[in-house]
Amino acid sequence: MKIILLISAFLITSILGCNNQTINELPQQNPSETTTTAIAVTNSPEKIKFKTEFGADLFSLKQQTNEAKLVDGNEQELAKMREEEPGKLKIKNASDKVLGYVIREKGLWTIKNPEQTQSLYILKRHNAQKYTLEDTTKKEIYQIKTQNDRWEINTPQQNLLYQVRIRDGKTSLRNASANTVFSTKSEIAPIAFACFGLDILTREQQAALAYAVNLTGGQ
């Protein structure tokens, strides 16, 4: 009887030991690697979607490597922009007609005509809190600057035109009456988002400028 009990105990110990060894040999997933991958995907959106105050799709900026497309709320292409060479962005419409260029330098973005013979507008970074848009005569058209928890787009006479507000993961463009013009929950630099409030530009120019500014975070 004792021999039988000893044999049974030996068998049970052996089985448990094998099971523990099998569990220990299973490949372990690194939680930090999984989290890092998820964050990397979340922080690198390819599409910036703009919606109306009531949540309807208005237009989107679909970003890809060295290029982007502007589409309307029905996904119809309005314009495309491609970096032909470092710092030089070509703007075309849906029919492949060249609309102009955005030339990017450090703290300076110049919108040029299709023939590249004339500078039309220049977005200039003065410091981290202030930007200006000038015309070809270097006359100031807009001032874009931080004010408390928001960005403001003003005339040179300090008349408020728009505000860029960031709250609860949403970036909104609001007019002088504090009504929302459109908003996005996608990641975009506030100064790049503000480019869509520069009414003197066409929507295609706004999108190209915003894309160029967003590439460097406004630097």
Image: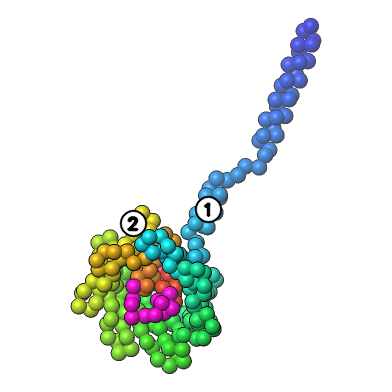
- The residue that label 2 is drawn on is 167
Q: Amino acid at mark 1?
A: Ala
The Cα atoms of the two marked residues, 2 and 1, are separated by 23 Å
Occupied quadrant, residue 189? bottom left
Q: Position of residue 22 (x, y in %)?
A: 70, 34
Q: Secondary structure at mark 2?
A: strand
Above or below: residue 21 compared with residue 9: below
- The residue that label 1 is drawn on is 38
Q: Mark number for residue 191?
A: none
Mark 1 Cα-neighbour bin, 10 Å: few <14, some 14–19, many ≥20: few
Mark 2 Cα-neighbour bin, 10 Å: few <14, some 14–19, many ≥20: few
Q: For marks 2 and 1, give the one nearer the viewer.
A: 2
Q: Amino acid at mark 2?
A: Arg
Q: Measuring 71% from the left and 21% from the top, which residue is drawn there?
A: 13
Q: Measuring 28% from the left and 68% from the top, which residue is drawn there?
A: 175
Instruction: Say which of 64 and 204 sits in front.
Output: 204
Q: Position of residue 147 (x, y in %)?
A: 25, 65
Occupied quadrant, residue 96? bottom right
Q: Which residues are magenta?
A: 197-207
Does 140 sit left or right of 27 as displayed?
A: left
Q: Measuring 40% from the left and 83% from the top, which residue is drawn there?
A: 111
Occupied quadrant, residue 159? bottom left
Instruction: Say which of 160 and 192 sits in front.
Output: 160
